Structure formats: structure tokens, C-alpha cells
Amino acid sequence: MKIEQLRKALRLYLVMGSPNCGGADPAAVLEAAIAGGITMFQFREKGAGALQGAAKLELGARLRRLCAQHAIPFIVNDDEGLALELEADGIHIGQEDTPAAAVRQRLKNMIVGVSAHDLAEARSALAEGADYLGVGPQYATRTKPDAREVQGPAAIQRIRAGGIRLPLVGIGGIDATNASHVIRAGADGVAVVSAIASAHSPREAAAELVRNIK
Ligand SMILES: Cc1ncc(COP(=O)(O)OP(=O)(O)O)c(N)n1
Ligand SMILES: Cc1nc(C(=O)O)sc1CCOP(=O)(O)O
Ligand SMILES: [Mg+2]
């Protein structure tokens, strides 16, 4: 995928697994979110009650098919083996995961997203071959108990001021009330979990986010 295409795909990035859906069918949540306007999806099956083994693979395959039907890039969180098995478009890795350079080397044709919390980590990710950055947490989040301390949109401004032009999304505590601040700080898009996956209407929640980041 070309860099300008990736910037557009990152505009409204849904990150989600079954523990984030409040008992609803994750495929129904994803389908509604696609109808509402999400532009990229990450399968992140993590946290209390997360599926394992064959059940995880089966859910991943259902979500992967849905994304393919709607031309939505499908990214897998953390797990290279799963990304290959599901023929994902890409993988997202963090600072505590397999080093980005090794993943880049092995998954030459996939999109590689890397979490960065500051300019130094953004520079390293760029040097290691990242295609995009996820910068967070922008705001307080209950979705990721091991998230770092809140960095705020200022972290994005510092990364842009440091000359990093890689496609970049903000993540963590983002919803329709604050998404525009993240974009104004220099992000190409926002990545959200609960603002869509836990919403009463994931379709309307996604559509409202789209309106707020225009
Ligand atoms: C788009 C995006 N940005 C950041 C993250 C966080 O990745 P990581 O720090 O590896 O934490 P986990 O998601 O693995 O718990 C992400 N997943 N997506
Ligand atoms: C998956 C993830 N990564 C983060 C980071 O800071 O890197 S915060 C986070 C959870 C985001 O969930 P919500 O949109 O519900 O706040
Ligand atoms: Mg990770």
C-alpha cells in the first residue's frame, strides 16, 4: 500500500476483540462499524475472557473475511503467526513485543505498525522500518490496564516537530468529543476501541467520529 493510501486508511481505525464488545457478536459490531465509516481494523483479542487457540483463530477468520468483503485493511495485534495464518494486511507491535526490525525483516509485504510514546521511540520505529505509528495514550483509558501514563496530543506535536512524517494515529481514550484535538496535533487519524465497540450503536458511534475528524 502506498504511503498516502495508508494515511487515508488510518483515518478511523477500529481496534477490537471479543472482550470489548460487551457480549455482542464481534462480527456484528465490526459490520456496523464498517457501515458507520471505519477505514481500518485491528484484531486485538486481549484481556479478561479473551478467546484462545481454535476459537481465536475462527473469530479472526470471520473478521478477516468481513474486512476483505468491504476492502478494509485487516491488521493483527502482536502475533506474527496469526497474521500469517489469517493472511492479514499487516501487524501492530508495541515496545514490549518482538522488535520491529525483526518483524519487518520476516513480514516484508505486510504493513507494520509500531507503538511509540515519544520522539525517541518514533525515530527508532522509523529506522526499524515501521509503516505507521500508534501514539498513546492520548487520554485516560480503561481498556488497556498496562498503558503508559497519559501523553496527550502534545506527544504527537513533539513527534511531528521532530521531523517524523510517517503516517500516525493517536490511541487511548479517544471519542467523538476529543478526536479533533488529536487530528489537529498532527495525526492522520484516530484509533479507538471502546468508543465504537462498547457503544449502544457502533454504527452511529463510528459515523459521529467520522463527522468530528473531518
Ligand atoms: C494503533 C495502535 N496503537 C497502539 C497500540 C498498542 O500496542 P501495544 O503497546 O503493543 O499494546 P497492546 O495493544 O498489544 O496491548 C495498538 N494495539 N494499536
Ligand atoms: C490498545 C491501546 N493502546 C494504547 C496505547 O497507549 O498504546 S491505549 C489502548 C486502548 C485504547 O482503548 P480505548 O479506545 O477504549 O481507550
Ligand atoms: Mg502489543
Image (cartoon, rainbow, N blue to C red):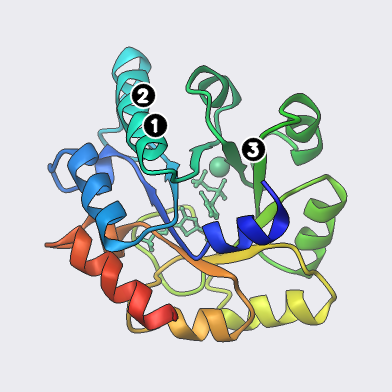
Front in this rendered view, residue 142 or 201: 201
Give whichever of discs 3 and 1 has the lower sequence position.
1
Q: Position of residue 159 (x, y in %)?
A: 75, 74
Residue at the disc numbered 3:
97
* Position of residue 155 measured from the top left corner of the image (x, y, whole percent): 66, 77
Q: Amino acid at mark 2?
A: Ala
Query: Mark 2 falls on what kind of element?
Result: helix
Name which residue type carries label 3: Asp
The answer to which quarter of the image holds residue 142 is bottom left
Is the distance from the Cβ of mark 3 to the nearest ligand 3 atom less than 8 Å? yes
Q: Which badge, 2 or 3, comes first in the chain's sequence?
A: 2
Give the Cα distance between marks 2 and 3.
Answer: 23 Å
Look at the numbered discs 1 and 2 and tell me whether their residues touch, using CB distance below 8 Å.
yes
- Residue that carries the numbered disc 2 in the rendered image: 61
User: Is residue 136 among the parts visible in the rendering?
Assistant: no
Q: Secondary structure at mark 1?
A: helix
The residue at 71%/31% (across/down) is: 109
At x 41%, y 72%, the residue is 140
Image position of 31 (left or right of 175)? left
The 10 Å Cα crowd at callout 3, few under 14, some 14 to 19, many 20 or more, is some
Residue 64 image label: 1
Whole-Å distance between the Cαs marked 1 and 2?
Answer: 5 Å
